Amino acid sequence: FVAISNWLKNVAESSSLLNKYNISVIPNNIDLNLFYPELKKYSFSFLKFNTNKKVILIGAINLNNLYKGFTKFIDALDFLDKSKYIICTFGNGDFKLVENKGFEVRNFNFINEYKTLRCLYSMSDVFVFPSLYEAFGKTIVESMSCGTPVVAFNNSGPKDLIDHKLNGYLADAFSSKS
């Protein structure tokens, strides 16, 4: 059997169904010809976006999915200075929740073009990945490939990808304050 993260391998090895089998790990991959750092100035220009604030990026196909941890992100906003940050989003989600916290928000909606997504990652100061459980986390690797650090919970698949305080931050599991 093949798992896409060490966390998933450990879960499989502890199951009564798979604990008798050898389980290997082969992580997912991305095309580095599509995801690489763009200059911030170019990225802002390409996206027709301008701000003096720090850019926090969050996105997923469906952030409303309970396991994507969007409510943990919303709670974490209480610990940030609204005057210093702008929240950029992509994908689908109830982004009015961010606006209700008093933050400036720029929603890029669903992105189906690599250059736009690459520029969005590249212009951001940090990508937040608040998933409660995730086997891998492809957007983590996309973001880091574009030179943008990632904040995620120190549990499940993301802990295989993020080197704490080197290319991102591993927050205490499920702690919005962390």
Image: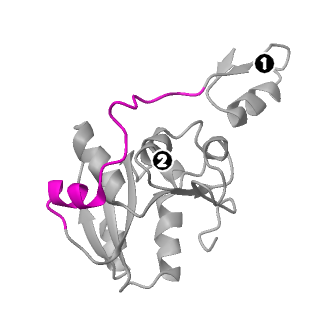
Please tell me how many numbered marks the rendered image carries: 2
Choose between 138 and 144: the one closer to the eye.
144
Q: Is residue 43 magenta?
A: yes
Q: Magenta part mainly helix, strand or loop? A: loop
The x and y percentages for residue 35 are 36, 38
Which residue is found at the position 54% from the left and 51% from the top? Answer: 131
22 left or right, relative to 147: right
Q: Which residues are magenta?
A: 27-49
Placement of the C terminus among the 4 image quadrants: bottom right
| Amino acid type at mark 1 | Leu
Report if residue 92 is visible in the image: no
The residue under label 1 is 18
Q: Is residue 167 magenta?
A: no
| Amino acid type at mark 2 | Met
> Tell me, what colour scheme is on the image?
one colour
The residue under label 2 is 144
The x and y percentages for residue 92 are 31, 51
Which residue is found at the position 31% from the left and 45% from the top? Answer: 118
- How far apart marks 1 and 2 lie (CA) works out to 32 Å
Circle 2 sits in a helix, a strand or a loop, which is it?
helix
Choose between 6 and 74: the one closer to the eye.
6
Which residue is found at the position 33% from the left and 78% from the top? Answer: 103
50 left or right, relative to 158: left
Circle 1 sits in a helix, a strand or a loop, which is it?
loop
